[in-house]
């Protein structure tokens, strides 16, 4: 069995600025996991599937009908999942009906694979190794901070967990709006 997920990434210039935030969490709050990961927004959460039949996963992604054209995402506020044992701090996209529509289209094609079908778009900046006390300290600061990131979403990607890291398997461009 192999582990997969579907997401999209900000462009390198935005990702680098977001990595400065994850670096702050790593250095000041001991939350290194997000800094060691790549910035992304998840559409379909991780799911297990037989790695011998990876072509079924890639085929579904590449053949699905997508009607969503490239669109802009704005990340301006921090938010959190205040879970007692594993709190998460993230950048939250502004409400976006196009993003929701993209999720619905991808989910319709990929729901054959067994995963948690809920959608709360976010770009994680601290998780898992953020201790409860570090969360309190970090959140007391970041809850009032503002961000100003935006980028155009032009493709989605399938990732596979391999040798301890997530690797891109295939990319799918959104239909041209021209």
Image (cartoon, rainbow, N blue to C red):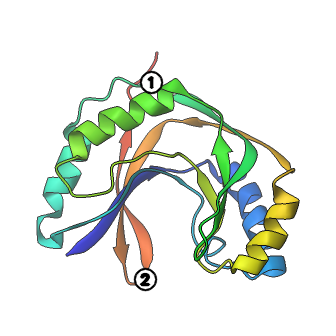
Q: Looking at the image, which residue is at 69% across and 81% down?
A: 131
Image-based side of 139 in relation to 99, left or right = right
Q: Which residue is mark 2?
A: 164
Observer-nearest of 51 and 82: 82
Residues packed near mark 1 inside 10 Å, few (<14), some (14 to 19) or many (20 plus): some
Image-based side of 26 in relation to 56, left or right = right
Tell me where residue 1 appears, x and y as whole percent: 19, 76
Q: Looking at the image, which residue is at 78% across and 63% down?
A: 21
Q: From this view, report whether residue 91 is shown above or below residue 22.
A: above
User: Please, what secondary structure does the residue beneath circle 1 have?
Assistant: loop
What is the quadrant of residue 142 in the picture? bottom right
Q: From this view, report whether residue 120 is shown above or below residue 19.
A: above
Q: From this view, report whether residue 17 is shown above or below residue 136.
A: above
Q: Is residue 125 visible?
A: yes
User: Please, what secondary structure does the residue beneath circle 2 have?
Assistant: loop
Q: Which residue is mark 1?
A: 69
Observer-nearest of 109 and 119: 119
Q: Looking at the image, which residue is at 45% across and 77% down?
A: 165
* Residue placed furthest toward the front: 84
What is the quadrant of residue 96 in the picture? top right
Q: From this view, report whether residue 59 is shown above or below residue 53.
A: above
Q: Looking at the image, which residue is at 86% across and 51% down?
A: 145
Tell me where residue 38 appears, x and y as whole percent: 57, 64
What's the CA distance linking mark 2 and mark 1?
33 Å
Tell me where residue 11 appears, x and y as whole percent: 62, 48
């Amino acid at each position: 069995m192999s582990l997969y997920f579907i997401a999209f990434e900000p462009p390198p210039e935005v990702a680098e600025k977001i990595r400065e935030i994850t670096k702050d969490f790593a250095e000041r709050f001991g939350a290194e996991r997000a800094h060691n990961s790549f910035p992304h927004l998840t559409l379909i959460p991780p799911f297990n599937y037989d790695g011998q039949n990876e072509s079924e996963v890639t085929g579904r992604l590449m053949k699905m009908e997508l009607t969503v054209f490239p669109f802009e995402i704005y990340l301006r506020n921090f938010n959190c999942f205040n879970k007692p044992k594993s709190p998460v701090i993230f950048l939250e996209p502004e409400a976006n009906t196009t993003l929701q529509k993209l999720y619905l289209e991808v989910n319709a094609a990929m729901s054959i694979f067994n995963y948690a079908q809920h959608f709360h778009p976010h770009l994680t900046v601290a998780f898992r190794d953020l201790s409860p006390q570090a969360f309190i300290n970090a959140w007391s600061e970041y809850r009032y901070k503002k961000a100003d990131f935006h980028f155009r979403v032009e493709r989605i990607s399938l990732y596979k967990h391999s040798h301890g890291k997530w690797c891109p398997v295939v990319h799918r461009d959104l239909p041209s709006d021209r």
